[in-house]
Amino acid sequence: QVQLVESGGGLVQPGGTVRLSCEASGIIGSITFMGWYRQSPGKEREFVASISSSSSTDYVDSVKGRFTISRDNAKNTVYLQMNSLKPEDTAVYYCYVVIFVRKSQTYWGEGTLVTVSS
């Protein structure tokens, strides 16, 4: 059973920094993509960042230059370093992994809340 456990959320002031972690366990097969989505109150879930098995990264425009995604393949863990946080970054952040075993399947974490407020 694949499980994703996120950590690192909380309350932070505007301009502050947060680092999210997401560890995957129960993995059988190869993890191809890892990444993060977020969902703010009253809004649809949106893509934030992804990283491939070859460490190629992609970001939504609104976080470019402020957020950095990375992964530790030995630990099956993906990170999201969030700098220069803004109130509009307030959301529940969900990690995901894409695992390939004959076909690709996507697994999601339960989410961690990041609140940016003074």
Image (cartoon, helix red, strand yellow):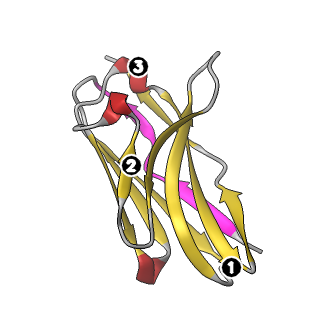
- Which residue is located at x 64 percent, y 25 percent? 44
Q: Amino acid at mark 3?
A: Glu
**Res 21 → quadrant:** bottom left
Looking at the rendering, in which quadrant would you find the N terminus? Answer: bottom right
Looking at the rendering, in which quadrant would you find the C terminus? Answer: top left
Q: Say which mark, if any, is on residue 88.
A: 3
- The residue carrying mark 2 is 58
Q: Amino acid at mark 2?
A: Asp
Q: Which residues are magenta?
A: 3-13
Whole-percent x and y of residue 64? 28, 37
Q: Where is 103 relative to 15, above or below?
A: below
Q: Amino acid at mark 1?
A: Gly
Q: Nearer the viewer, residue 40 or 116?
A: 40
Label 2 vs label 1, nearer the camera: 2
- The residue carrying mark 1 is 26
* Residue 8 in magenta stretch: yes
Left or right of 73 in this view: 113: right
